[in-house]
Amino acid sequence: MQIWQRILITALCCVLLNGCWDRTEINDLAIVLATGVDYKDDKVELTAQIFIPRKAGGGDSTGGGGSPSGVTLIRTAEGRTIAESLNRLQRKIARNMFWGHCEAIVLSEAAGKHGIREYIDFFLRYPQIREHAYVFSTTEAAKDILALLDPLERSSAESLREMANMKLGTRTTVLDLAKSIEGPGASAILSRMLILPPEENQDKLTTTPYIKGLSLYKNDRYIRTVTEPLSVGVLLLAKELNNIIMPVDFEQSKGSFSIRPLDIQTKYKPKISGGRWSMAVDIQTRGEVVLNTTDENLTDPAVLKKLEQAWCKKLSKMAENALRMSQQEMHTDLYRFAVEFRRYYPKQWKEQQKNWETIYSELDVKIKVKANVVRTGKSTGPQGIPDEDEH
């Protein structure tokens, strides 16, 4: 092959190579860290928390060690649908909005009352939004949660993500939410976020969101809010109870013990016999005592046994109250019992799935709890009480 032929072939190959003519530089992007959805005056309000890179690496502009003010900015737009709101939101920002780093989505309960199926469809269908972004609910306006300037984190988006990773409430992603709403149980449980009052002499935005209670959804609509102790029972049955310290009272004894569960396992065993549907719930947990305000000594096996029985009784009561609320008040399968029946009895489930709400409300559920205290702490007896051998 002649040299001029080689040159010609090389030139033709170069023509077919993809270049960088359609690239988008990072300086042309507005990186969205979190988004919120509100509903007001029959309009959907979409809020984006956007990262400001030019201020992220700089020193503390406040001169102290406090608020990371200026790291993020908030933009809001409204429309008849969430897609229309996004279109109008982009017109308020001079850069292309990039949703690939959106870590948290906050839905206001006002928006939830009108149904969240539209929002779920959008978040799963829009190509940039991650299906593993965490979803939260709030009694406040979602845009007010995103506007907070957390003194500890760079943004409220990071605060929300860390709370989800710590499992302080439910750890629900967009994909989880879609599966819950569209699944046989047709329900969802979201952590409910509130705004912590700021410290004295601090700006009202220099504070953090915090979890208090749960928002419960039936089908795709917000139904009600539950707080402690009922919310603890809901999390227990929903296999979401983590990172908690529980006070346990002793009968005929002043004070109480505080127990931190080390692990909690909740298992379901469905059964259909003679046309009757039932569910056995088995809860097993191990815990450690972190506080003793009684006069009891945990080195006594009888006292330890008594404590375990009291803890079992407390957990059983919490679970039963949560089950009663779900079955008799909401008539909603919050705990995905339907998934278990569909798995173990596919034929019967197919025949009766249309009647599941009625079946669930009348379902015979037996709750069994086994709780063991495996650690009593570094101290043995109650503090402040002298030992018998002291003189």
Image (cartoon, rainbow, N blue to C red):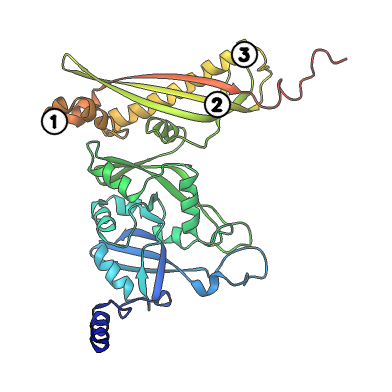
Q: Answer above or below: position of 67 versus 258.
A: below
- The residue mark sitting in front, 2 or 3, is 2
**Could you classify mark 1 by the number of other residues whose Cα lies within 10 Å: few (under 14), some (14-19), or many (20 or more)?**
few
Q: Residue furthest top?
A: 302
Three-letter amino acid code at disc 2?
A: Gly
Please state if 183 lies on the left or on the right of 367 as rendered.
left
Three-letter amino acid code at disc 3?
A: Val
Instruction: Say which label, 2 or 1, has the lower sequence index.
Output: 2
Instruction: Say which label, 3 or 1, has the lower sequence index.
Output: 3
Query: Quick check: can you spot residue 176?
Result: yes
Mark 1: which secondary structure?
Answer: helix
Query: Quick check: can you spot residue 251?
Result: no
Three-letter amino acid code at disc 1?
A: Lys
Q: Measuring 33% from the left and 25% from the top, which residue is drawn there?
A: 268
Picture coordinates of residue 310 (x, y %)? Answer: 53, 18
**Residue of label 1:** 350
Q: Which mark is residue 303?
A: 3
Q: State the CA–CA distance, disc 2 to disc 1.
A: 41 Å
Q: Answer above or below: position of 82 versus 371.
A: below
Picture coordinates of residue 291 (x, y %)? Answer: 64, 28
Mark 3: which secondary structure?
Answer: helix
Q: Which mark is residue 287?
A: 2
Picture coordinates of residue 345 (x, y %)? Answer: 19, 25
User: Toward the viewer: 263 or 139?
Assistant: 263
